[in-house]
Image (spheres, grey):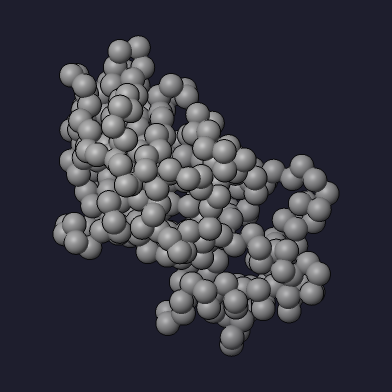
Amino acid sequence: MWFTPGMLPDDITTELTRLCTAHLGAETGPRVAALARNGFTLSPVDDGAGASGRFRFGGPALLEPGTPWPEFEGTPLTLLAVVDTDALRPWLDAPLPAGAGLLNVFYLGYESALADDVAASRQAHFEAPMDWRVVPADPATAVEAAPPAGGVVLPARPVRADPVVALPDSTGSHLAPARHEENTAEVWEAFERLLDRLPDGTGKDGVLAGIRNLPESGDDGHRAFGWPWAMQGMPVPVETRVHLLQLDTDPAWTWADCGMVTFEIPADALRAGDFSQVDCTMESC
């Protein structure tokens, strides 16, 4: 994800389309430019007034009345984040179903509770689908919900979401993007040719020289939608999947060896509201 100082996200999208067309032609250029997705960088803020709606890390869940708290074998999962997708409009371009204006992202943990991991600065691990859950809620009816006895509530951290244009990281990992169809392979190959040329761009073309989809030095890599960063080759960018949330290691939690944890879902499943198909990837730095 990236910004050019003084440029708005829509301006960047327009400039990217122009560049792709100039370098790759009127037929292939727009198809490559279409790989760009609207996303958000996420920054915890001290003042809740600076948050994007009810977007936050930790705290109580926001669930519709009667929604059971997710558990696994009697152990309540821990709420990692509430993603306020309503607050992300109109920049959000993901195919969200009705009733998913809030996404509650839960985590179980492995061998020890997440609270113990956080308190002791140990590593938190994801092992299997039962370890995580994404539960949608309608903002009009959602209410704060606490976990049942034995559950853990992480400190609430309000979050500001800033819109950005995101490009997939197809060259920074050792695994290639999924290319199941010939036309898809053609687009990805053209995209990589474009990346090879942009770092040497000068003048107007030079504004897009840094589109490797890597974090700026010192930044926490929390993000939602768009494309995730790839670490150790994962997650592999796939056009048919939607990135929901990526949490970076920061002073509040550690993922693997100072890595990141990423939640993704097939686009068809998201469109249908089937959040049971959310996948989770955790990679070290």
Residue plotted at (70% across, 64% down): 32
Residue 7 lies, in percent from the top left, at 46, 79
Residue plotted at (30% across, 36% down): 63
- Apparent side of residue 100 relative to residue 26 in the rendered image (left or right): left
Residue furthest to the bottom in view is 203
The correct choice, above or below, for 25 with respect to 204 in the image is above
Residues 195 and 107: in front is 107
Residues 131 and 48: in front is 48
Residue furthest to the right in view is 182
- Apparent side of residue 137 relative to residue 28 in the rendered image (left or right): left
Residue plotted at (18% across, 57% down): 48
Residue 153 lies, in percent from the top left, at 20, 33
Q: Is residue 2 visible?
A: yes
Residue 259 lies, in percent from the top left, at 40, 42
Q: Is residue 213 visible?
A: no
Residue plotted at (32% across, 24% down): 68
The correct choice, above or below, for 113 with respect to 258 in the image is above
Residues 86 and 13: in front is 86
Residue 24 lies, in percent from the top left, at 77, 72
The correct choice, above or below, for 38 with respect to 248 in the image is below
Q: Quadrant of the C terminus?
A: top left
